[in-house]
Image: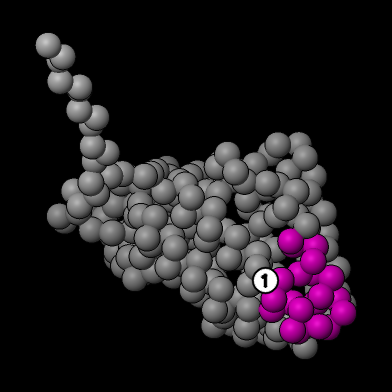
Amino acid sequence: MTDSRPSLTGEELYTALRRDMIDSRVQGGTVLQEEEIGRRYGVSRTPVREALQRLHQDKLIGRKGRFYVVASPSHDSIRQIYEFREAIETASVALCCERADEALIETIQACLNDQAEAGHAKQFYEFERLDTQFHVLIAQGAQNELLRRQLEISYDQIWFSRVGNLVSLPDYSVEETLAGHQRILDAIRRRDAGVARAEMYTHLRSAILLSARSRPQTRTSGTPRTPRKKKPAPTS
């Protein structure tokens, strides 16, 4: 029996792979086999290689010898991603204030309401997915495809990292995240670009600080040890 599924192009397979890798929370270091991917999606090696090359360009996968492996971003990489997000998201939220229509603003509010429900139900995978959607919808409201695309890539990189998974950290507060999102959206609703920028910056800066606090503290070779107290000399 032949496979009746339509063959995917390299671009279509790239989109499908990126979505499936994130949805299944593929662990960093997982080897991606070309033959296995081809069998799973019913495609030849050419679109598989094109898709893997795109994922590699987006830094979602790396190379290990002749194989592609799922990336595992370091603490420093996550810090850089959040700093990059600070730059583009403060710009996108200001543009969203100017350009978003009322229908999109209500869509963002509905997303935030769903995120609150997921958080209160402790459905943290769904909470994170809706967190991403909230920020991407704001970028969509900016009506700048380049901003939206770069933001999606940065979120994908964070999703592959347990370091970037802030909701799993002990200091993380669901309520603070939801309150920060609501303040951002309220500023968008008022078309107050200055306040929206400030709220977005504060929101993302807190994520950077939280991620930094999760970094394991290790003593470097240059750190002096605490000197031991000398025992008193025996008295005669």
Assess whether residue 189 is covered by the magenta stretch. Answer: yes
Figure check: 206 above or below 224: below
In percent of the image, x 26 and y 55: which residue is there? 68
Horizontal placement of 152 versus 34: left or right? right
The amino acid at mark 1 is Met
* 61 to the left or right of 92: left
Residue at the far top in the pictured view: 236
Magenta residue span: 180-199
Q: Which residue is mark 1?
A: 200
Q: Main secondary structure of the magenta part?
A: helix
Q: Is residue 204 left or right of residue 77?
A: right
Residue 36 x/y as whole percent: 32, 46
Report if residue 63 is visible in the image. yes
- Residue 100, position in %: x, y? 78, 81
**Residue 167 is inside the magenta segment:** no
Viewer-side residue, 234 vs 21: 234
Q: Residue at x 44, y 63 (%)?
A: 79
Q: Quadrant of residue 14?
A: bottom left
Q: Residue furthest bottom?
A: 98
Q: Residue at x 76, y 36 (%)?
A: 121
Q: Compare residues 43 and 110 and report the one nearer the observer.
A: 110
